[in-house]
Image: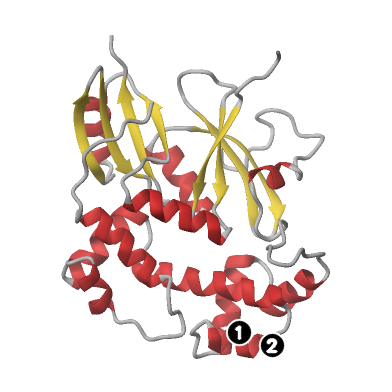
Amino acid sequence: MSLKIKLTSVMVDDQDKALKFYTEVLGFTPCRDFEVGGGFRWITVVAPEGHPDVELALEPNANPAGRTFQSALFQQNIPATAFEVEDVEAEHRRLKALGVVFTMTPMQMGPVKIAVFADTCGNLIQIYQPPE
Amino acid sequence: MIVAAPFPRNSTVRRLGRAKDLLCQDLDQKLTLAAVAREAALSPGQFIRAFKAVFGQTPHQVRIEARLELAKRLLISGSMPVTDVCVTVGFASLGTFSHLFTRRIGLSPTAFQREARTLVQVPGTLPPKLYPGCLTLMWHWPADINFREARRPGF
């Protein structure tokens, strides 16, 4: 078995806006970015820490079905994905200072501490601090 | 690790989500800011600020984007002239429609429609070239680009 997880994606309503938010606000590092026609780009970013070869694709949410799905998740407060952080409280303070809107401030949920924010691209994103 | 958490049934964020959906509906109708702000139970000023903070765009920008997306779908259908598409998606001026469409999509409405007509389309689906999924995007992966070589200027 040689299956590997090297790529994951999050649907975004605007790729320019997403690249700006995920790099300048969240702190991801740009990885790939090239035109694929139709006004779309293949954009991936990598986390500044962690596995440098695991890419997050900022996937254009052009399909109407995808938009419906994204909107439903958002309105049901279901995060599109989750990122691990060392210190949720510190990350909450840092992002809030940058104008990020949190729908859930840091909260202990069993063994993990989590917080949820809007990524400005139609998604809620969860950050979690694993138990020590 | 995504954890389900309690969420107020009528929170501001949920109402903003509903307001965003409203902005993307009935695109040929006139929709006032006050009406959408009421959906979010906020004053117009509070609504614009909160909406921009959560979605990164103003309500007006979202409505324009939704109109352009609908225009794309109508143009792809191929049977409607550009002028009719312009009116159907709620633009009063063909010049404004054409300018905004070209700036956003990279092709004029006419050129976009011409290109769409050349694509083979399965009934009931949208052409993957114009509405790509993740894997469709990867089909365009340049063979001569290696890891981290595809950065745009400025990065």
Secondary structure at numbered mark 1: helix
User: Residue B1 at x, y = what percent?
Assistant: 38, 26
Viewer-side residue, A3 vs B89: A3
The reply, left or right, for residue A42 in relation to residue A86 is: right
Hey, which quadrant is residue B149 in on the image?
Answer: top right
Q: How many marks?
A: 2
* Mark sitting on residue A56: none
Front position in the image: B9 or A56? B9
Which amino acid type is shown beneath numbered disc 2? Pro
The chain identifier of the residue carrying mark 1 reads B
Name the image quarter holding the C terminus of chain B: top right
Query: Is residue A123 among what the camera can see?
Result: yes
Q: Is residue B26 above or below residue B22?
A: below
Q: Position of residue B129 (x, y in %)?
A: 72, 57
Please rate how many residues cluster around mark 1, counting C-alpha atoms within 10 Å: few if below 14, some from 14 to 19, many from 20: many
Which kind of residue does numbered mark 1 sit on? Val
Q: Tell me whether circle 2 and circle 1 mark residues in contact (CB < 8 Å).
A: yes
| Nearest the eye: B155 or A31 | A31
Residue that numbered label 2 is attached to = B81
User: Would you name the residue on which mark 1 appears?
Assistant: B85
Q: Quadrant of residue B103?
A: bottom right
